[in-house]
C-alpha cells in the first residue's frame, strides 16, 4: 500500500469532480443562456391571468351616415376566487349591487377548479363605479359591448343581432362579423400559481376595434318602406308584407322592410321558433310564384327579339287573339279575366300589359320557344342566386331547360310554374328598365375605420347585359302606361313618370291551388324615362282584397310619394 | 502535488501541535451557509406567508440551523480529529440505529409518501444526512487501521457491508437520491482507500444490474424517468417539477432577475426553498450566479482535496477526502437534477437548501475538515 497510489487516486477524484463541474456549467449554460428565451416565453404564459378587453364592435350606418347599430359602453365584472380575501362579503356586496342571488354567487366563488368567474355582463358605468368603491380584491372589470340599435324594429331582419358575447348571429351582423368584430385585447396581471395577484406590472394589450359598415340602405326610404308594410299589415292582416327598394342604376338596396318585425334591442332569444321566423329575411330567403309581375321579363324578351329581327317575336302593333283560352299540350290555359263584354280584345302588347292578360304572354313564350325564352331567363339570372352580400339566399325554382314541357313554358310566360325570390324579381325588373344592365345586388357599399379611412369599397359590379337600351326604353314606357292607364293606376302620381306591373298569384299548398290564398304584388319604378327608384311590394295572403292592383300598387305609390318629398324631386315637365 | 510518502500515523502522534489550518474552509462554509439563509428567505417568503402567515418561517428555521451549525463547526474545528478514530463503531451504530428508527411508528415522520425523518418533540431530523458522515468516519477509521487490507477483496468487505447496509436502510424509506449519493460516497471511499479496481468492478456490476430492478420496483420512479426523458408530455403531472425548474433557470438567463425577483417562487416551483433552491438562485442571479456559487463549492472542494493531500496520516487523508467527496457528490447531483440532466430526485444542495439536519452536520463535517487542515503539512 503506497502513499503514491492514494495520491494518484485523490488526484483522479479531483479531476472527476472538476470534469463534473464543467459538465454542470455547460448544462446550465445551455438551459439558461441558449434555451433561456424559449423557456421564458413558455413560462410567461403561466405567470399571468388575463382580463379581456373587449374590442368595440363596428357601427352599421346607412348611406348617409345615420347610425343603425352601435354600442353602449358597458362593463363586465369578473372575479378570481383565489384572489378574493373575504368570499362571503364579496358575494354579498356584489349581489346587492348587481341584484344577484348572493348564495348562488357565493357558491360559485367558493367552487373548486374555477380560476375565473364571470359575475355579470353588460353592467352600467354607474354600477361599476359603485362596486369599485368597495375596493374588493379579486374583482375585476372590463369594458364590454352592449349592442344598441337606435331604430329598434327598423331593418331588423336585415341588420340581425349579436350574441351577448358580441358575436354576430344573424343578418349583416353575421355576414360582416369579420369586419365588425375587431380583435379583443387583454390586461395580463402577474399572479401566483393559484391566481392570487402578486406585485408586478400588469401588461396591457390594447384591443383593435371593429370596422364600421356603410350600407346602401337609405334610412329615409327604409322608414317609408317600414311604414308602408306596417300599414299594409294593419289594413289587410296578411301573413306578412314586404317591400324592397332598389337603386336600378347600381342595384344598391335602398330599403328592405318586412312586417311583422321585432325589436333588435329586445330580441326574443328565449323563443327560438319565433326568433327564427322573425329573423329570417324573406325577401332574400323565401321563394314564391310571382305571377303577373313576371310578365315584365316576358315582354322584355319579346321586345328585344323583335328589335333583333326575330320573326317569331311580336311587333308592338301586333294584336293578340281575343280568346280567353289557349290550349297547349292539351292543357287549357285561361286568362284571369272572363274577357266578357269586350274586355281584353284585340290587344297590343301595351294593352296586354295594361290588362295583364295571360294568354298574350303564353303566345309570346310559345312563339319565342324554349331555347330563346330560356336564354332570357338566364340573362335575367333566374334559377340562381343573385350573389347579394347576405347569408341564406334562395336561388328560386326554374324547370330545367331540358325538362320543360310546352304547357310549362306557356305558364312561365305569365309567371306561373316558376318560383323566385323577391330580390331576384326586383333585380330582373331593374335590369329590364334601366337600359339592360344586371348588377350584383348589395347591401354594403364600404367598410371604414373610426377615423373615417375607407378600408374596403364594395362597388357596383355589372354581371351582364340583359336587353338593349332601346328595348329597355320601350319596355319602360309600356310599363309607364300600365300605371297611367292600366292595372297599376293606384301607383300613379300626378306629374311624375311612374312605371310598374301588378301581380296577383294564387298560392299553392301541397301541390294544389289554395283557395282564397293570394300573393299580391306590385313592381314599380320612377321616373320611367330614367329609373332612379324601383320598389317591389309583396303582400302574402292579404285578407279582404287580393288584387295586386288594389293591395300593393297604392303602397308603392305611397313610398314613391314619400321619396319625392324626401329627396325633393321636381315633377316631370313636358 | 508532491509525491512525498505519507508519514505513518505513529510518527505524527508525537507532534500534536495546534496550528492555524486552512482558514478558507471556514470562510467559504460560513459564506455559503449565510447565502443559503438569504436564499431560503428569498425562495420561501411568499409561500411561507401564504401557508403559515409568517414570511420568515423557513428563514428563521434556517437561521437557527446556521447558528447551531456554526457552533458545531467551531467545536469540530477545535476537536482533534484523530480522536474520531475511536468513534469508528459508535458512528456506524448511531447511523444505523437512527436510520432504523425512521421505521418505528410514532417516531418516523412521513411526508410526500416517504418516511425520511424522525420526530422528537418539535424537532425533526433526517438520519440519512447523519449516516453519510457516520459512514465516512467509519470507513476512514477502518482503512487507516490497516491500509494494506483494502487491497484484498475480503479486507474491503466491511466497508462495503457498512455502506451497503446504510444504503439498504435509506432505500427502504424510500429515498433513491440519498441512496445514490451514499452509494457514490461509498465507492469514493473504497477507491480512495486503495481498493483494487477489479474488485470494485466485480462489485459494481451486480449493483448496476440492481438499478433497473429498483426502478421497476416503484412505479413512480419509472414515471419520473419518463417525465425526465420528455417532461413536456406531462406538463401538469410528473413533468411539472422539472419544467418549473427549467422555467426558473431560463428566466434567469445570463445575469438573473435580481435578488428577491424570482417569479417561479410564487408557488409555481415546488420545494423552491429546499431541493430546488438552486433553480431560484439560477433565476435570481442567472448563469453567472450559478457559476460563482459552484466556483465557491469548487474552492471548498479544492481546499478539501489539498487538506487530504497534505494530511499526515491515512485517517486524515480518508476523512478529509470523504467529507469533500460527500459535499462534491451531493452538490453535483443536486445541480444535475435542477438542470434536468438526471431524473428528478429529492436531494438538498449542501449548505444552501433549507433543512437543519443537513446544514448542521455538513457544517460540523467541514469543521472536522478544518481541524485536519490544522494538522496538515505545510
Image (tube, coloured by chain):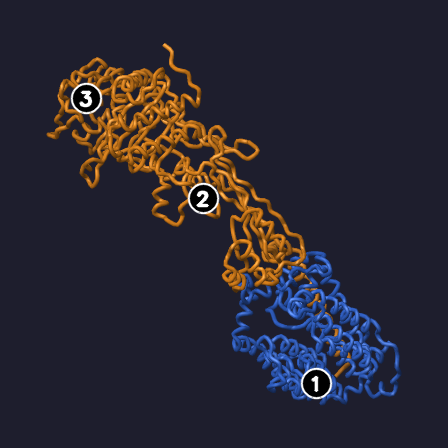
State which mark lies toward you, 2 or 1. 2
* Chain bearing mark 2: A
Question: Residue at horizontal 37%, vertical 26%?
Answer: A559
Q: Residue furthest top?
A: A574
| Label 2 residue SS | loop
In depth, the one of B127 and B185 nearer the eye is B127
Asked whether, in this view, residue A286 is left or right of residue B137, the answer is: left
Q: Given the image, what chain letter belongs to the residue carrying mark 3?
A: A
Q: Which residue is mark 3?
A: A360
Residue at figure coordinates x 67%, y 55% from the top left: A200
B339 versus A144 height, above or below:
below
Question: Can you tell which quarter of the image residue A404 is in?
Answer: top left
Along the viewing direction, whichever of B32 and A421 lies nearer the viewer: A421
Picture coordinates of residue A382 (x, y %)?
Answer: 29, 31
Badges 3 and 1, same chain: no
Residue name at image x 53 percent, y 31 percent = A454
Q: Residue at x 74, y 65 (%)?
A: B293
The image quadrant of residue A285 is top left
Left or right of A353: which side holds A175? right
Chain seen in blue:
B
Q: CA distance from mark 2 to mark 1?
A: 86 Å
Callout 2 and callout 1 share a chain = no
User: Residue A368: x, y in percent?
Assistant: 21, 22
Front-most of residues A484 and B193: A484
Residue B150 disc label? 1
* Chain depicted in orange: A
CA–CA distance between discs 3 and 1? 127 Å
Q: Quadrant of the C terminus of chain A?
A: top left
Q: Which residue is mark 2?
A: A162
Q: Position of residue B31 (x, y in %)?
A: 79, 69
Amino acid at each position: 500500500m503506497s502513499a503514491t497510489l492514494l495520491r494518484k487516486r485523490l488526484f483522479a477524484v479531483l479531476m472527476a469532480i472538476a470534469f463534473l463541474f464543467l459538465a454542470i456549467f455547460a448544462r446550465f449554460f445551455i438551459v439558461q443562456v441558449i434555451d433561456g428565451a424559449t423557456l421564458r416565453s413558455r413560462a410567461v404564459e403561466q405567470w399571468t391571468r388575463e382580463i379581456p378587453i373587449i374590442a368595440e364592435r363596428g357601427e352599421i350606418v346607412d348611406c348617409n351616415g345615420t347610425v343603425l347599430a352601435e354600442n353602449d359602453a358597458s362593463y363586465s365584472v369578473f372575479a378570481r376566487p383565489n384572489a378574493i380575501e373575504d368570499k362571503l362579503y364579496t358575494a354579498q356586496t356584489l349581489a346587492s349591487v348587481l341584484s344577484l342571488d348572493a348564495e348562488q354567487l357565493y357558491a360559485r366563488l367558493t367552487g373548486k377548479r374555477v380560476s375565473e368567474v364571470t359575475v355579470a355582463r353588460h353592467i352600467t358605468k354607474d354600477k361599476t363605479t359603485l362596486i369599485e368603491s368597495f375596493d374588493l380584491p379579486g374583482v375585476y372589470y372590463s369594458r364590454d359591448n352592449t349592442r344598441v340599435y337606435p331604430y329598434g324594429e327598423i331593418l331588423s331582419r336585415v341588420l340581425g343581432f349579436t350574441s351577448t358575447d358580441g358575436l354576430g348571429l344573424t343578418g349583416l351582423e353575421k355576414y360582416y362579423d369579420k369586419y365588425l368584430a375587431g380583435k379583443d385585447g387583454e390586461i395580463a396581471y402577474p399572479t401566483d400559481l393559484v391566481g392570487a395577484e402578486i406585485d408586478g406590472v400588469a401588461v396591457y394589450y390594447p384591443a383593435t376595434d371593429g370596422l364600421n359598415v356603410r350600407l346602401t340602405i337609405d334610412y329615409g326610404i327604409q322608414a317609408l318602406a317600414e311604414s308602408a308594410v306596417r300599414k299594409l299589415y294593419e289594413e289587410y292582416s296578411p301573413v306578412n308584407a314586404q317591400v324592397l327598394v332598389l337603386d336600378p342604376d347600381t342595384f344598391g338596396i335602398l330599403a328592405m322592410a318586412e312586417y311583422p318585425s321585432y325589436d333588435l334591442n329586445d330580441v326574443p332569444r328565449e323563443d327560438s321558433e319565433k326568433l327564427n321566423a322573425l329573423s329570417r329575411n324573406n325577401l332574400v330567403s323565401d321563394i314564391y310564384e310571382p305571377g303577373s309581375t313576371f310578365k315584365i321579363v316576358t315582354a322584355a324578351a319579346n321586345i328585344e327579339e323583335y328589335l333583333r329581327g326575330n320573326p317569331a317575336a311580336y311587333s308592338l302593333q301586333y294584336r293578340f287573339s281575343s280568346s280567353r283560352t289557349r290550349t297547349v299540350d292539351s292543357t287549357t290555359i285561361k286568362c284571369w279575366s272572363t274577357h266578357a263584354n269586350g274586355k281584353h280584345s284585340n290587344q297590343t302588347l301595351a294593352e296586354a300589359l295594361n290588362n295583364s292578360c295571360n294568354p298574350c304572354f303564353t303566345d309570346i313564350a310559345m312563339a319565342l320557344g324554349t331555347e330563346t325564352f330560356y336564354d332570357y331567363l338566364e340573362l335575367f339570372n333566374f334559377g340562381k342566386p343573385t350573389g347579394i352580400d347576405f347569408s341564406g339566399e334562395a336561388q328560386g325554382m326554374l324547370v330545367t331547360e331540358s325538362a320543360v314541357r310546352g304547357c310549362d313554358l306557356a305558364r312561365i310566360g305569365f309567371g306561373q310554374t316558376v318560383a323566385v325570390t323577391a330580390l331576384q324579381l326586383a333585380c330582373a325588373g331593374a335590369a329590364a328598365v334601366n337600359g339592360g344592365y344586371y348588377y350584383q345586388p348589395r347591401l354594403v357599399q364600404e367598410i371604414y375605420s373610426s377615423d373615417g379611412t375607407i378600408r374596403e369599397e364594395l362597388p357596383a359590379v355589372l354581371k351582364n347585359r340583359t336587353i338593349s337600351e332601346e328595348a329597355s326604353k320601350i319596355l319602360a314606357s309600356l310599363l309607364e302606361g300600365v300605371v297611367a292607364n292600366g292595372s297599376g293606376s293606384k301607383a300613379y302620381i300626378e306629374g311624375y313618370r311612374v312605371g310598374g306591373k301588378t301581380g296577383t298569384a294564387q298560392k299553392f299548398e301541397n301541390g294544389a291551388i289554395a283557395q282564397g290564398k293570394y300573393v299580391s304584388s306590385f313592381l314599380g319604378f320612377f321616373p320611367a324615362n330614367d329609373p332612379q327608384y324601383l320598389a317591389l311590394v309583396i303582400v302574402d295572403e292579404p285578407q279582404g282584397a287580393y288584387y295586386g292592383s288594389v293591395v300593393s300598387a297604392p303602397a308603392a305609390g305611397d313610398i314613391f310619394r314619400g321619396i319625392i318629398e324626401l329627396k325633393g324631386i321636381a315633377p316631370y315637365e313636358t | 502535488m508532491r509525491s512525498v510518502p505519507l508519514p505513518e500515523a505513529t510518527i505524527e502522534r508525537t507532534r500534536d501541535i495546534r496550528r492555524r489550518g486552512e482558514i478558507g474552509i471556514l470562510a467559504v462554509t460560513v459564506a455559503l451557509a449565510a447565502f443559503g439563509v438569504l436564499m431560503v428567505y428569498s425562495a420561501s417568503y411568499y409561500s411561507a406567508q401564504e401557508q403559515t402567515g409568517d414570511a420568515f418561517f423557513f428563514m428563521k428555521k434556517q437561521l437557527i440551523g446556521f447558528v447551531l451549525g456554526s457552533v458545531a463547526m467551531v467545536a469540530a474545528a477545535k476537536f482533534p480529529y484523530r480522536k474520531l478514530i475511536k468513534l469508528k463503531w459508535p458512528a456506524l451504530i448511531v447511523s444505523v440505529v437512527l436510520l432504523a428508527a425512521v421505521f418505528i411508528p410514532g417516531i418516523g415522520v412521513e411526508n410526500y409518501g416517504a418516511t425520511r425523518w424522525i420526530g422528537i418533540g418539535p424537532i425533526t431530523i433526517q438520519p440519512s444526512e447523519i449516516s453519510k458522515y457516520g459512514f465516512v468516519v467509519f470507513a476512514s477509521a477502518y482503512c487507516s487501521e490497516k491500509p494494506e487490507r483494502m487491497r484484498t477483496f475480503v479486507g474491503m468487505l466491511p466497508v462495503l457491508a457498512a455502506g451497503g447496509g446504510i444504503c439498504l436502510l435509506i432505500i427502504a424509506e424510500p429515498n433513491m437520491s440519498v441512496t445514490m449519493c451514499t452509494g457514490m460516497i461509498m465507492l469514493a471511499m473504497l477507491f480512495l482507500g486503495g481498493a483494487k479496481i477489479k474488485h470494485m468492478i466485480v462489485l459494481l456490476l451486480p449493483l448496476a444490474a440492481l438499478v433497473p430492478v429498483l426502478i421497476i420496483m416503484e412505479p413512480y420512479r419509472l414515471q419520473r424517468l419518463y417525465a425526465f426523458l420528455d417532461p413536456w408530455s406531462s406538463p401538469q403531472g410528473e413533468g411539472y417539477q422539472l419544467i418549473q425548474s427549467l422555467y426558473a433557470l431560463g428566466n434567469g438567463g445570463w445575469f438573473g432577475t435580481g435578488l428577491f425577483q424570482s417569479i417561479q417562487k410564487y408557488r409555481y416551483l415546488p420545494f423552491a426553498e429546499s431541493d430546488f433552491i438552486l433553480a431560484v438562485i439560477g433565476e435570481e442571479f442567472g448563469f453567472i450566479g450559478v457559476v460563482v456559487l459552484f466556483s465557491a463549492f469548487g474552492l471548498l472542494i479544492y481546499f478539501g482535496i489539498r487538506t487530504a493531500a497534505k494530511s499526515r496520516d491515512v485517517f486524515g487523508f480518508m476523512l478529509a477526502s470523504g467529507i469533500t467527496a460527500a459535499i462534491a457528490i451531493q452538490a453535483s447531483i443536486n445541480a444535475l437534477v435542477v438542470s434536468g440532466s438526471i431524473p428528478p430526485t429529492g436531494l438538498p444542495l449542501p449548505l444552501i437548501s433549507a433543512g437543519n439536519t443537513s446544514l448542521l452536520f455538513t457544517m460540523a463535517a467541514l469543521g472536522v475538515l478544518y481541524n485536519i487542515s490544522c494538522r496538515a503539512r505545510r
